[in-house]
Image: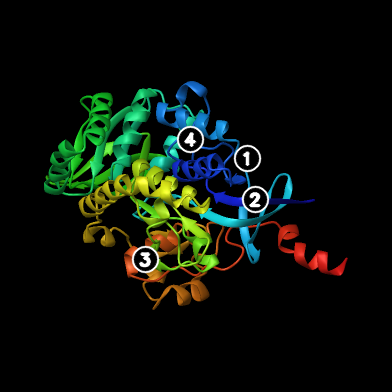
Amino acid sequence: MSNGHQCDVLVIGGGPAGIAAATCAAESGASTLLVDDNPRLGGQIWRSTAANDIPGQARRWLNKFKASGCRALCDVHIVDCIGDKVLRGESGRGIQTFMYSKLVLATGARERLLPFPGWTLPNVFAAGGLQALVKGGAPIQRKRVVVAGTGPLLLAVASYLKRRGAKILCVAEQAPWERVAHFGVGLWSRPTKLLQAAAMGAALGAVDFKAGCWPVAARGDGVLREVDFHGSGGRFTLACDYLACGFGLVPNLELPRLLGSEVVNGFVAVDEWQQTSIAGVYCAGEPTGIGGVDSALAEGHIAGLAAAGRRHQARSFFRSRATAREFEEVLSATFRLRPELRSLCGGDTLVCRCEDVRFDRLRQMTGWREAKLQTRCGMGSCQGRTCGTAAEFLFGWDAVHTRPPVFPARVETLAADTVASTN
């Protein structure tokens, strides 16, 4: 069964940027539809399954979104562009077709995972992935957890898990103490960020925070038992039940690239109105730069208002966007990955988990295309979203080759045009 939808402004992505864009467009009088691939709006950062677990800021925006009259469709995956200003998606309700006048892409980001010996053991999770599982009801009480990688997300995950009853043994940040300390001092000029950091610090209490520290190996007898770390004092081992590990965020660029939007230095290029290189297509949030909620909301305001033809109102959010972008630059400089992380893999370390491709095999290749052809790296169910970003860091390859469908799709979805043409 195929369902058609038509609107003035179509917003893809239900995180903070998408919610802000859709709300502003709808409040401006444009018929607006927000489409998201999750069961509920909120994105990864505002994800929740219980009303009392929703952050106050998220609750206010969700109420504002509901009052705006904007329509929302959840559990829909956009898989292809099938014509001028026409997208195709699929859901449990069948094939979905979306026709629009203006489009706002707020497709968010995903965690960067870097391979090391033992990273595929059960109970080794992406940091945000473990948090999402706990939000979905997975038990964490009294479990020994180590959170490792880089960026403010580590503290957010650790504080959340601790509030849910986990025993946080350590937060291991790969950035050196000098950069972390400079970042902390800089928060005094950003009162809101300082309060957020203070709240997380209070939640963590006496949890051990180690800068200049990263995991080098995980071991266990069929499930994680202990993790080796490299720190300022040398190598040490922690016995634990879970390792939550994430090395920053990478933007989800599949749909912007499929539409032909220009990408510069790994992010979608936009003008002052958040418009991409394609007229009528806007982009907001992490695809334009990893900056957190404040940046996403500012860009969402501007994109939604501009798409609805309210540029004079959009201009009032330029200052808040500029402030947020300054913070983006600080985040990028502070938590940039150290080169030592490129040497974590052993020869038999899996890099592509979907197709069981090991590091030794990949380092014989000259590039991403050859790796796909010769080893099937990136050809599994994640379609290179995990191993591709790892390969970019490890080998310097350009691992981006977007083609439809941008996500795995059912045969009936792929065959829809063929079926229609024969009827």
**Quadrant showing the C terminus:** bottom right
Q: Are marks 2 and 3 in contact (CB under 8 Å)?
A: no
User: Which residue is label 3 attached to?
Assistant: 392
Q: Which residue is depicted at the point 48% across and 49% down?
A: 310
Q: In the rendered structure, find residue 322 and report the number of the disc placed on it.
A: none
Find numbered disc 1 in the image and state the secondary structure of the residue it sits on: strand
Q: Quadrant of residue 272?
A: bottom left
The reply to whether callout 4 and callout 3 are in contact (CB within 8 Å) is no
Cα distance, mark 2 to mark 3? 38 Å
Q: Nearer the viewer, residue 79 or 173?
A: 79
- Name the amino acid, label 1: Arg
Q: Which residue position is annotated with label 4?
A: 47
Please state if 270 lies on the left or on the right of 11 as rendered.
left
In this view, the mark in front (1 or 3): 1
Q: Which of 164/293 is in front?
A: 293
Say what secondary structure mark 3 lies in.
helix
> What is the C-alpha distance between the residues marked 2 and 1?
10 Å
Residue bearing the label numbered 1: 71
Looking at the rendered structure, the kind of residue marked 4 is Arg
- Mark whose residue sits in front, 1 or 4: 1
Q: First in sequence: mark 1 or mark 4?
A: 4
Which label number is shown at residue 7?
2
Q: Secondary structure at mark 4?
A: loop
Task: Tell me which label, 1 or 3, sits earlier in the chain.
Answer: 1
Q: Earlier in the sequence, mark 2 or mark 1?
A: 2
- Compare residues 61 and 183 and report the one nearer the observer: 61
- Amino acid type, label 3: Glu
Camera-near label (4 vs 3) is 4
